Amino acid sequence: MSTHTVTMTINGRRHTGTVEARVSLADFLRDQAGYTGVHLGCEHGVCGACTVLVEGNAVRSCLMLAVQADGAGVTTVEGLAAADGTLHRVQEALMNEHGLQCGFCTPGIVMTMAALSGEGKKATETELLDALSGHLCRCTGYQGIRRAAQQLAKPEAMDTANGEQS
């Protein structure tokens, strides 16, 4: 049985662990690093619940091996909000539009939307919805999620105080 030492920066913190070559990133994140916001639904890359950001890109962590993420920066849903508890704009949009129900699929949906709506990024509604088409949700009926995508894609409101976009 071949084992490998992997080190990655998860949510801004450095984590090192020893894994068998076949251990998925999802299992490493949950079992060794303790980030249980990474949900495992299908373990075949179909449901999207395990989506995390690896170097800013949305990745199905059940399909990626932990050894493939060695040296990478990984963000899970636990690391998306600011240190002071301020929610990420995706989390705010989903909350405002009632795009949350049981929460099982939520981390993957949030992380996919965050990959396209992070700092300095502005996705269109179509891009957001296309990216979300691979996520399965049994509870919401998708309407709140669609409204959140529409909210994220809207042009920024004009700041009436100085006439600039905020």
Image (spheres, rainbow, N blue to C red):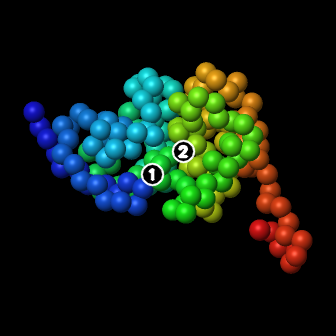
Residue 72 location, quadrant: bottom left
Residue 100 location, quadrant: top right
**Residue 135 pos. (x, y %):** 57, 30
- The label on residue 111 is 2
**Residue 117 pos. (x, y %):** 63, 52
The answer to whether residue 29 is left or right of residue 139 is left
- The label on residue 75 is 1
Whether 16 is drawn above or below 98: the answer is below
Question: Which element is circle 1 on?
Answer: strand
Residue at left 80%, top 69%? Answer: 165
Q: Looking at the image, do the residues carrying marks 2 and 1 touch, with CB atoms under 8 Å apart?
A: yes
**Residue 156 pos. (x, y %):** 79, 60
The alpha-carbon separation of the residues under discs 2 and 1 comes to: 8 Å
| Residue 103 visible from this viewpoint | yes
**Residue 131 pos. (x, y %):** 61, 38
Question: Which element is circle 2 on?
Answer: helix
Residue at left 11%, top 37%? Answer: 2
For the N terminus, which image quadrant?
top left
Residue at left 18%, top 49%? Answer: 5
Residue type at mark 2 is Met
Instruction: Name the residue at the left extreme.
Output: 1
Whether 56 is drawn above or below 143: the answer is below
